[in-house]
Amino acid sequence: MFDYPTLKIIWWLLVGVLLIGFAIMDGHDMGVGTLLPFAGRNDVERRVILNTVGPHWDGNQVWFITGGGAIFAAWPLVYATAFSGFYWAMMAVLWALFFRPVGFDYRSKIEHPTWRSVWDWGLFVGGAVPPLIFGVAFGNLLQGVPFSFDDQLVSTYSGSFWQLLNPFALLCGVVSSAMITLHGAIYLAHRTEGLIQMRARRAAAVFGVLLLLAFSVAGVWVAKGIDGYVITSTVDPAMLANPLAKSVSREAGAWLGNYQRMPATMVLPLLAYVGVLAALALLALRRTGLAFIASALAMTGVIGTAGASMFPFVMPSSSQPQASLTVWDAVSSHFTLAIMFWATVVFMPLIIFYTSWAYRVMAGKVTERYVRDHEHAVY
């Protein structure tokens, strides 16, 4: 069995894998939903778009649920503190997600333009709002969240919902939204043809350029205008969950420290740029499957850059830096992490195998003729 410090690192990596998996798998569903009212100009085209993700969108929610469950079990202090501080933001995500199952199931049951248009915009909300809010949340994590702990480790959040909507956080929201919409546009181009595919390719070009610009501006902002966090006391990696047993200071440029100490981490931001450019180039060559893979690698680079910059911090505190939650002191017990690790070793390959099989079985183009021939059997 792995020792406690090793398991802490393993679960930092596994939570990152789950977040990236959620972004790639559920992200292309959300990206397609974001493009639905714009890439489809009539009812049949919109039904084509819906059925590109129709067989898989609910299965992809597994990544969202698993990611939330992993944070709850592996990092209980992070889960409790984040859901109290980001309560209204998380509620907004859930309210937006409500439109997805209802929209998919009820949108085509009544042949009335107003009825279907309302559900189309509901699916747009369900696809566009969560990535925006997740990006805003990451932007606030990079700046520090105003929370503190008392001697009993009861957290108190001293901010407000509107404070979350600061300029840097909104910029991170743009990065997240552009990333997800780019991914969805590439998937839509992969599963469609004709006019819909052409519009999807155009959307991918727009959001790909927007992602590169916003990601670059955010990087400069972090380097020049955002103070990072540094642990200034000796930390025992085997310590139990007590975030107050350390000293933390804020320093200019601290979020770039890991790239100096571990130059290999520079691969992550480089992967973001190369992935986006490769995805757009492959899409222009109509190699849509490879473009989707390149887009997934770009997402890995973007999300990995945020994680590598903050390590070992998971949720820094701007009002009580000492209370900042890190990989070392926000985790569950050694026994809990070990049990979860072996459960992941068993079930994660099964999830990946089943998902791969399902996508292979239901691969191919979705066309207007297919939708008309299966009028009452598809979304």
Image (cartoon, rainbow, N blue to C red):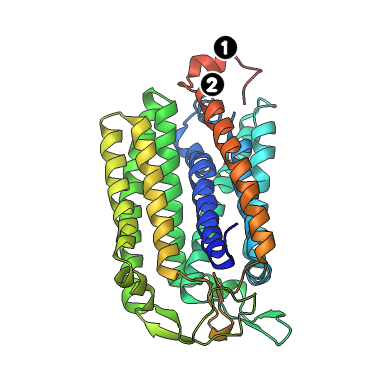
Label 2's element? Answer: helix
Numbered label attached to residue 20: none
Question: If you read the primary sequence from the N terminus, does the residue marked by circle 1 or circle 2 appear first?
Answer: 2
On the image, the x and y values in percent for residue 139 come to: 47, 67
The answer to whether residue 46 is left or right of residue 39 is right
Q: Quadrant of the C terminus?
A: top right
On the image, the x and y values in percent for residue 3 come to: 57, 64
Residue, x 64% and y 57% (percent of image)? 338
- Amino acid, disc 2: Val
The answer to whether residue 192 is left or right of residue 11 is left
Residue, x 32% and y 52% (percent of image)? 271
How crowded is the residue under tag 1: few (<14 C-alpha within 10 Å), some, or many (20+)? Answer: few
Up the image or down, 345 lies above or below 367; here it is below
On the image, the x and y values in percent for residue 280 come to: 29, 40
The answer to whether residue 215 is left or right of residue 2 is left
How crowded is the residue under tag 2: few (<14 C-alpha within 10 Å), some, or many (20+)? Answer: few
Q: Quadrant of the N terminus?
A: bottom right
Numbered label attached to residue 373: 1
Residue, x 71% and y 87% (percent of image)? 151
On the image, the x and y values in percent for residue 248 come to: 49, 85
Instruction: Decide if residue 124 is in sight here.
Output: yes
Q: CA distance from mark 1 to mark 2?
A: 20 Å
Of the pair 16 and 319, the residue shown nearer to us: 16
Of the pair 323 and 342, the residue shown nearer to us: 342
Q: In this rendering, which labeled residue sits more in front, label 1 or label 2?
A: 2
- Amino acid, disc 1: Asp
**Seen from this angle, which residue lies furthest top?**
373
Label 1's element? Answer: helix
Up the image or down, 182 lies above or below 49; here it is below
In the picture of the structure, the residue carrying the numbered disc 2 is 361
